[in-house]
Image: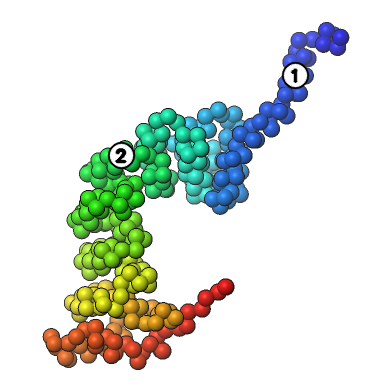
Amino acid sequence: MIFQKLSTAAVLVLLLSSTAPHLRAQQTSTFYGLEEYLNRKMVGPEPVKIIIGHLKESRTNAPLDNLVAWAKGGFADLHDEHGIWKTDALGVKLGIVHSIHYYFTTSPPPDKSTRYLATLDELRRDDYISYYLAQMAALVVDESVLEKEVLQLLQADNPTLRAQGVLMGRPLAEEKRSLFERYQEMVENDDDAQVRMIILYSISGWRRKDVAYIAFERLVNDPDAKVRDWGARGLWSAADLRILTSDDLNTILPEMLKASDPFVRISIGRTAARLTTDRSLSVRTDQITDELLYRYLSRVRKIGSQANLAHEWLEWWTPLIPDYTASSRVVH
């Protein structure tokens, strides 16, 4: 028999060489689902190759733990001797976010809620990864556990933790009035501009009039320029999506007369133009300048306190529409 003539070492080599292709195939199939998922998420071919390659080379049986540890360690192997990334850093980090979500949803650990929050805590130092993991928390963490964690974070002294709580609680705040009112109180009174900005960012897509007026209030009253900018975005979006109508002119136009900041005046003017222009036309917002709006302001100031601001706006703006709009073209 051939095996009787071979040394023990030779037999081991033969066995290993015969099983290696099977092991490689098994390993490839193990991560095929993840690779396919990352491709669907349009992570990018190079980051996907790096992540899958890392998992294969590590020969891990616990890919979730492995990826979290890799990210927590700062992806040391992807930096050169000077600490500079050798590849697309954001692409890899986005791929890690989706990979973590993939394993929590396809192979969830028994204590998935606690485990997800612990993972988020471990990776909190990476602003990019924690930013996206926080927004995905509601997809993994049980609602009661999530709400408790969010309320704790919103009370934290650290503004970074408060901002993370806002991101995590966004889906809950959309449904729970009490939590929404907490957001509303914070967007007006939190002493950190980043927290206020994150709140506006989080709620601006809800397509609700009360949210539109929160954005309007921040545009008019917030001391921070970046927060006012998000207020302007929320107000414009509400007008563009028909959440606000021309009936709201009498609420927003008085603030244009009071505002000392040109940005506030221009933002309100552009919103008023959108509200009073046919939807088949797009407003050339770059041409709605403070100089142009001064003509409207002069008009109503001459009339005085008896001026109907909405009526005067329509009288002034309607003849200007052909010069300050363009046809909206729908590409089929």
Mark 2 or mark 1: name the one nearer the start of the chain: 1
Q: Residues within 10 Å of mark 2 (few under 14, many from 20)?
A: few
Residue 316 at least partly seen: yes
**CA separation in Å, label 2 and label 1:** 53 Å
Residue 104 vertical position relative to residue 195 in the rendered view, above or below: above
Mark 2, mark 1: which one is toward the viewer? 2
Seen at 56% across and 45% down, the residue is 37
* Marker disc for residue 144: 2
Point out residue 324 in the picture as x, y percentages from the top left corner: 40, 85
Tell me the quarter of the image containing the N terminus.
top right
Identified by mark 2, the residue type is Ser
Point out residue 156 in the picture as x, y percentages from the top left corner: 23, 43
Point out residue 325 in the picture as x, y percentages from the top left corner: 42, 84
Seen at 30% across and 59% down, the residue is 200
Seen at 20% across and 88% down, the residue is 300
* Colour scheme shown: rainbow
Q: Secondary structure at mark 2?
A: helix
Tell me the quarter of the image containing the C terminus.
bottom right
Point out residue 74 in the picture as x, y percentages from the top left corner: 46, 39
Residue 118 vertical position relative to residue 86 in the rendered view, above or below: above
Q: Secondary structure at mark 1?
A: helix
Residue 186 at least partly seen: no
Q: Which residue is mark 1?
A: 15
Q: Quadrant of residue 245?
A: bottom left
| Nearer-the-camera pick, 253 or 12 | 253
Identified by mark 1, the residue type is Leu
Q: Quadrant of residue 141?
A: top left
Q: Residue furthest right?
A: 1
